[in-house]
């Protein structure tokens, strides 16, 4: 069977939309119900909501212009992202998920990551 087996091929390694992978680190200034989310990951997770917000508030007339504003990282994008994130909790999973407490919901807070 090996790595080409039916189980690995069909059930494992599926791509999931609106998800990301990162390292969890301590945030001593955060409340227990909050999670710091890097700006780059947040914009990927909430991109469709940000596009809708840009169009609704008439900062963009179509999807293409809205995506361009996101790529250029215009300041209005971060403001709309903050608004969107207030109403959408995120789920964090710590592998291996052996019971229901392995996945928990948190309120995301934007953090600026320097590498």
Image (cartoon, rainbow, N blue to C red):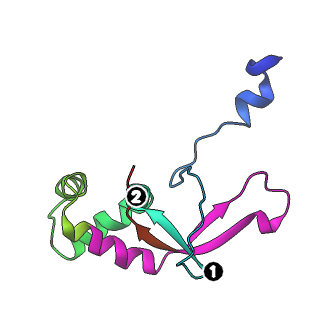
Is residue 25 highlighted in magenta?
A: no
Residue 67 image-quadrant placement: bottom left
Residue 62 lies, in percent from the top left, at: 18, 59
Horizontal side, residue 8 vs residue 22: left or right: right
Q: Is residue 104 left or right of 7 when viewed as pictured?
A: left
Q: Residue at x 60, y 66 (%)?
A: 26
The spot of residue 13 in percent (x, y) is: 66, 36
Q: Nearer the viewer, residue 98 or 14?
A: 98
- Secondary structure under tag 2 reads loop
> What segment is highlighted magenta in the picture?
78-107
- Marking on residue 78: none
Badge 2 density bin: few <14, some 14–19, many ≥20, Cα 10 Å: few
- How far from the left and from the top, in percent, is residue 83? 36, 79
- Does the residue at mark 2 contact the one at mark 1 (Cβ under 8 Å)? no
- When the figure is inspected, residue 16 is found, relative to residue 106, above or below; the finding is above
36 left or right, relative to 6: left
Residue pictured at 63% horizontal, 80% vertical:
32
Magenta-colored stretch includes residue 92 = yes
- Kindly identify which residue carries mark 2: 113
Image quadrant for the N terminus? top right
Q: How many angstroms separate mark 2 from mark 1 (CA)?
A: 20 Å
Q: Which corner quadrant of the image does residue 15 belong to?
A: top right
Residue at image location 37% in from the left, 67% down from the top: 49
The spot of residue 86 in percent (x, y) is 44, 80
Q: Nearer the viewer, residue 115 or 106?
A: 115
**Image disc number at residue 32:** 1
């Amino acid at each position: 069977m090996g790595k080409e087996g039916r189980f690995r091929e069909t059930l494992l390694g599926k791509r999931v939309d609106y998800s990301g992978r990162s390292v969890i680190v301590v945030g001593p200034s955060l409340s227990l119900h909050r999670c710091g989310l890097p700006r780059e990951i947040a914009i990927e997770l909430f991109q469709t909501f940000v596009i809708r917000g840009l169009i609704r508030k008439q900062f963009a007339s179509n999807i293409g212009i809205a995506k361009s504003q996101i790529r250029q990282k215009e300041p209005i994008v971060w403001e709309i992202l903050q608004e969107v994130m207030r109403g959408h909790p995120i789920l964090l999973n710590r592998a291996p998920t052996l019971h229901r407490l392995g996945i928990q919901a948190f309120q995301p807070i934007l953090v600026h990551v320097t590498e």
